[in-house]
Image (cartoon, rainbow, N blue to C red):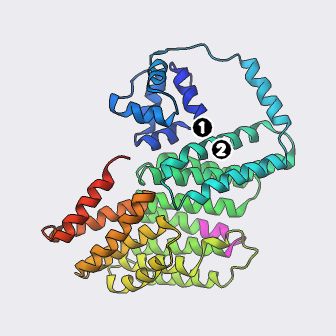
Amino acid sequence: MATKRRGFARARRAAGLSQEALAAVLGIDRSTVVRWEAGDTEPQPWIRPKLARTLTISPDVLGELLDAVDPVSPAPTDALQTDYDEARNVSTVTVAALRLQLQQVQFEYDMAPSAGLLVAASQQHGRVTHLRQQVSAPRVRRELWALEAESATFMGQLIWDASQRRDHASPRAYFNQAIEAARRIGDVTGEAYATLRKSYLSLYGEKAPHRGLRCAQSAADVGMAASPALTGLSLLHVAEAHAMLGEPRACEAAIEQARCQLGRVDDTDVAGEYLTPVEIERMAGSCYLFLGQPQKAHPILHGAAQSLAAKKKSQSIVLGNLALAYTRQGELEAAAQSLHRAIDALEDTRGGGGLNLAFEAGLELRPWRAEPAVQELHDRLFTLMSPG
């Protein structure tokens, strides 16, 4: 749809940001960005400094862009010629370079806030999608479809995490894009992984375990033909859905099925890194917590936390669950220690899942709010809530 503030919209695109990505960085709804670009509303003064920094422009330039209405757009023939020249030069080497760029951003995911990765990821994803629409060489187009599936899945993951698991619509759109791209070329692994990521929205965001169960089971069924690792990971989330529904037998059966899949993983499984003994343990611990068995959960979670030092976002989730397990057993000192460690990790990564669990653990410690140790934790959680 045409925008009135076309210069502002171009500045967003030049920064490599979709409307969804910009909204996630700023902690606002996408519809707010749409209204800004349509000229219906203006950014409030308090958000303009962060908006200017995100777009890598000065506050004065931002003000000029917001004041400008319907600036002259570039000649369409120039844009078409650029598209033609770029598409003509795309090769499998180009796709390999784009894949390497994506992998570099993915590598940072477990160590850095997602909001800080959105610019690079969104820019890269937009380029992949654009090139796929322009090229005609079948082999190159096929590889771009595969890369688009992977990139769209990662964009959904990033936006959901950056929104602290509150924005479900934008990630779902990216996951659907990934599923469609994967299906175009028969990429079963890509389709299954995007479907699994889509199940997380229902399970951990919308708190709709029945819908999440169906989606996770669908991911397991799709992945069965191609990847034991992805099938096993999907079954772990099937197990957690059953735990949320208070179904211990079905939960434990799914965990055992996942363990069986682990035994089938070999070096030809492209998703082999997703299913590990530690991943099974951390998910089992979370399941027992949902089943109201913190005494079974805490030793499992303790072991998993020790093994996840290099994956800070995953570790913060485990430590948040561990704090809940100790709190529900009345072990205040151990709960406080676990929550402090979770906050340590979250100060660097601001992972959405870990933040939500840390705040939940903080709420469950309220009966002991007069204790100095709990007061200190609440102070740290309050600081964590402050915008960066």
Q: Position of residue 150 (x, y in %)?
A: 66, 55
- Determine if residue 220 is in view: yes
Label 1, residues with CA under 10 Å away: few <14, some 14-19, many ≥20: many
Image mark for residue 16: 1
User: How far across and how far down the image is residue 268, in percent?
Assistant: 76, 74
Query: What whole-number distance in Å separates the C-alpha atoms at marks 2 and 1?
Result: 8 Å
| Upstream in sequence: badge 2 or badge 1 | 1
| Amino acid at the residue labelled 1 | Gly
Range of the magenta residues?
Answer: 219-228
Q: At label 2, which amino acid type do we have?
A: Gln
Q: Residue at x 37, y 60 (%)?
A: 355
Q: Quadrant of residue 257?
A: bottom right
What mark, if any, has residue 124 been given in the picture? 2
The answer to which of 167 and 22 lies nearer the viewer is 22
Question: What element does badge 1 sit on?
Answer: loop
Residue at the image position 51 percent from the left and 71 percent from the top: 237
Location of residue 292 (image quadrant): bottom left
> Horizontal and vertical percent for residue 92?
84, 49
In the depicted view, which residue is nearer to us: 274 or 368? Answer: 368
Q: Secondary structure at mark 2?
A: helix
> What label sits on residue 248 in the rendered view?
none
The residue under the point 42% across, 67% down is: 316
